Amino acid sequence: MKATDLLYGKYRNLILATAMFNLGFVIWFSFAPFTGGIAEEFGLSVQQLGIVASAAVIAVPLGRIVIGPLTDRFGANVTGGVTLVTVGTFAIVSAFSQTYEVFIGSRIVASLSGITFVIGIQHVAEWFEEENLGTAEGIFAGIGNAGAGLGAYFTLPRIFGEAYADPIFGSAFLATSSNWRAAFFYTGVLAVLLGTVYYVFGAAAKSEAKREATKAGVSWDQWRFIATRYGAVVLSVAYVMTFGLELAMNGWLGTYYREAFGQGDVVIAATFAASFSVAAGLLRPIGGYVSDRVARNETELLPFFEGQYRNQWTFATLSFVVLSMFGMTLAGLTGNIYVAVGAGFLVGVGCAFSEGAIFAQVPAMFPDNSGSVAGIVGGIGTVGGVVYPLAFSAAFLPNLHVGYAIVGASMIPILALTAWVFQPKVAERANDDGWFVSGERIVATGDDD
C-alpha cells in the first residue's frame, strides 16, 4: 500500500470507528436523561430505576467477550456494520413498546451498542503502529465516550424535550411520552444507516498480511491463554473500576441529581450529569497520550515500579479514581449540588485518564489478537456498570451519597492486585505468565507493514 493510501486509510477508518462508537454510546445511554418519564410511564420506583440502569448494561460483558474474537476473524467492517443495524432495529422496537417487559427486553438488545467499543479498539489497532497506539485509541475512545455526555445527556433532552411532537410521535396513542420514544426511534434509524456505511466503506486492516495474521491467531486455546495472563487479568479488573464506573455513573447521575438534591428540571439534571460524561470522554485521549510519552521518554513517575513506565502512569490514575470516589460522598453530604457536580467532574477526569492509560497497553499485549484482548478487558470491565448502580441505589443506605464511598472501598483490593502485578519482576513476565492455563501464546506469521 502506498504511503498516501495508508495515511488516508488510517484516518478514514479512525473516523468511521469513532462515529460508530459515539453513536453506540448515544443509543446505550439514551434512556438515562429520560428516566423520569420512563418511570412515570411504567410506574417505577428509584430502586427499580437502578435495575433499569443495570439492565442496560447486563448483556454487554458477554457481548464484548464474544465480539472480540469475531472481529479478529471477520474484520471490524463486518461486525461493526451488523452490530449497528441490529441495535438500531431494537432501539426502534423500544420506541413503540407499550409494556415494561417489551421495553426492558428491547433495551437489553439495544444496549449491545456498547460492544462497538471493542470493535473500534480492534479496528484502530489494525491500522496504527504501537508508538502512536495510545494516542489513536484515546482519540477514538474519548470522542466515542462523549456520546454518553454530549449526545445522550446533553443533546437528546434538548432535541426531544417534554413537549416534543412530530407526525409520528404526536398522536394521542403516544402523546403522554412521545419525547423518549422519539429519541429511541431516530437514533435507531441513524444506527441502521451508519451500519450500512460502515460495512461498505470500512476496511478491516492496513494490509492483507496484517488481516491474515490477525485471523490466524483466533482459537479457543489462544483465547484461554490470553484471558488468564497476569497482564490481561489486572487490566480487566482495573477496567471494572474505571470504565465500569463510568457506565454506572452515566446511567445513574441523572437520577442522583434529581432525587438526592430535588432537581426536578430534566434538562438541568441531565446537564449536571453530562459534566461527568464529558470529562470521562473528551479527556480520555490525554490518558493515552501521556502513556505514550512516558514510555517513549522513559519517565519514572513512581520509582517503586522501576522501568515500568506505562504501568506507573496507569497505577497513578487508578489511585486517583479511588480517592475521588470518597470525595464524591463527602461532596454529596455537604448538600450543595454544585459541589457534588464538581466532585463528579473529578471522578470523570480520573476515569478518562485511567481508561486511556489502560487501553494504551491493551493492544500492545497481543498485537495480532487485539480484538480478543479488547473483548476480554472491555467485557469484564463492563461488569462494574451492572454492579455499581445497585450499590448506588441500595435501599438499606441512609442516603444516596454513601454508595460512592462503598464502591470506592470495593476498589482497594483491585488497586492492591495491580500493585503486585506492576512490580518489575512480575510485570516483565505478565503477558506470558498467568493463572490456570499454561503454555505459550500462538504467534502468527506475516508482515504487518
Image (tube, grey):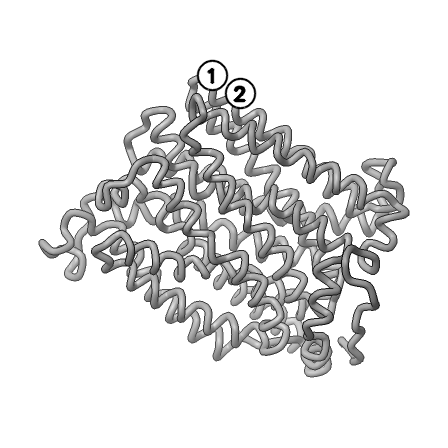
| 322 displayed left or right of 386 | right
The image shows residue 374 at horizontal and vertical percentages of: 64, 60
The disc at residue 148 is: none
Residue 317 in view: no
What secondary structure is marked by label 1?
loop
Q: Residue at x 43, y 43 (%)?
A: 251
Mark 2: amino acid = Leu
Vertical placement of residue 112 versus 152, above or below: below
Vertical placement of residue 368 versus 349, above or below: below
Residue 37 in view: yes
Instruction: Place residue 91 in its image quadrant.
Output: bottom left
Q: Residue at x 37, y 51 (%)?
A: 30
Between 35 and 339, which is closer to the camera in this rendering?
Answer: 35
| 196 displayed left or right of 444 | left
Q: Which residue is mark 2?
A: 330
The image shows residue 4 at horizontal and vertical percentages of: 67, 76
Instruction: Place residue 420 in its image quadrant.
Output: top right
Q: Which residue is mark 1?
A: 334
What secondary structure is marked by label 2?
helix
Marks 2/1: CA–CA distance: 7 Å
Between 139 and 396, which is closer to the camera in this rendering?
Answer: 396
